[in-house]
Amino acid sequence: MLKKLVRTLPVVLLCLAFALPVAAKGITLRSADTHDKNYPTVQAVLYMGKLLDQWTDGRIKIKVFSGRQLGEEKATIEQTIAGVIDLDRVNLAPLNGFIPETAIPALPYIFRSTEHMHKVMDGEIGQEILAAMAPHGLIGLAFYDSGARSFYNSKRPIKSPADMVGMKIRVQNSDLFVATIEALGAKATPMEFGQVYEALKTGVIDGAENNWPSYESTRHFEVAKYYSLDQHSMSPEVLVMSKRSWDRLSKDDQALVRKAAIESVAVMRDLWNQRVEKSKKVVMAAGNDVIEDIDKQPFIDAMGPVYDRFANTPELKRMVKRIQAVQ
């Protein structure tokens, strides 16, 4: 019995260490993000923390662990559900497997523009998707922009699906992203984000897909010179809170946290637009081949099986139609 207690003691102490900040006198919420400290999502959560600090005279604070300090997104989601991490900024893709509603805004080419995406996610449909997270141990607080994801590779310009046939393309650990790549004739290679640069450099993969800031900040543009702006995904990222941590807050504090998260969105979007322009300048100065003249229709036409697979219930099919109908 004593040996068993000794073995479990570190785990117990760890849980206590993370539970102690949520006390009556003061609350320190631990927030995780895989991006670096200057990234717009990290800065937005820091801004959220400043608001909470001001509104509560220092009683509620946020401590942000950026740059994968607490692990890759799959690991941080698990820790957030367990209540070890309080706040977590993640892409929707890792949530697709157990929260079906999160796959809908991640469907390829579902948004016509950034403005269309904002109107959908800031409205009733976005609220429904956030609410769908609660039964799974997460409280959806707000959506952050993730830009338009496009393909980049080290082999050749991509102007049509035919150009992708046989290419090994890194994707997030998401069945939806795997299906999207395979529908275009390429070979999907799930891989953690931090491994992509070396894999591109050594030829383990031929390409990947992401937005302008990620393409630039990770230095992927150094080893994948062709960036084809097909903009297949404008899926936002999401700021979630552990339901266990949420339930320890008073109703008033819950309202403050939600309000601060919502107010951080405008800050994030402004910083995002600045970051995109900066990243474009860096990549263009490096002389990369940025392909903008792309007919998206053949890419869209190839997505039928993907929609059939992931919008696979009457409710999800209706959500797709509602999104497409938003003007």
Image: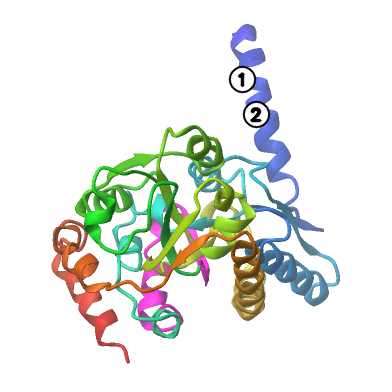
Q: Is residue 235 magenta?
A: no
Q: Which residues are magenta?
A: 121-146
How packed mark 1 is, by other alpha carbons closer than 10 Å (few <14, some 14-19, many 20 or more), is: few
Name the amino acid type tagged 1.
Answer: Thr
**Quadrant assignment for the C terminus:** bottom left
Residue nearest the observer in this picture, 72 or 180: 180
As drawn, is 285 to the left or to the right of 321? right
As drawn, is 206 to the left or to the right of 237? left
Q: Is residue 137 magenta?
A: yes
In this rendering, the answer to whether 4 lies above or below 241 is: above
Quickly name the residue at label 1. Answer: 8
Quickly name the residue at label 2. Answer: 12
Name the amino acid type tagged 2.
Answer: Val
Point out residue 187 in the picture as x, y percentages from the top left corner.
Answer: 28, 42
Disc 2 is placed on an element classified as: helix
Dividing the picture into quarters, in which one does residue 317 lie? bottom left
The answer to whether residue 252 is seen in the rendering is no
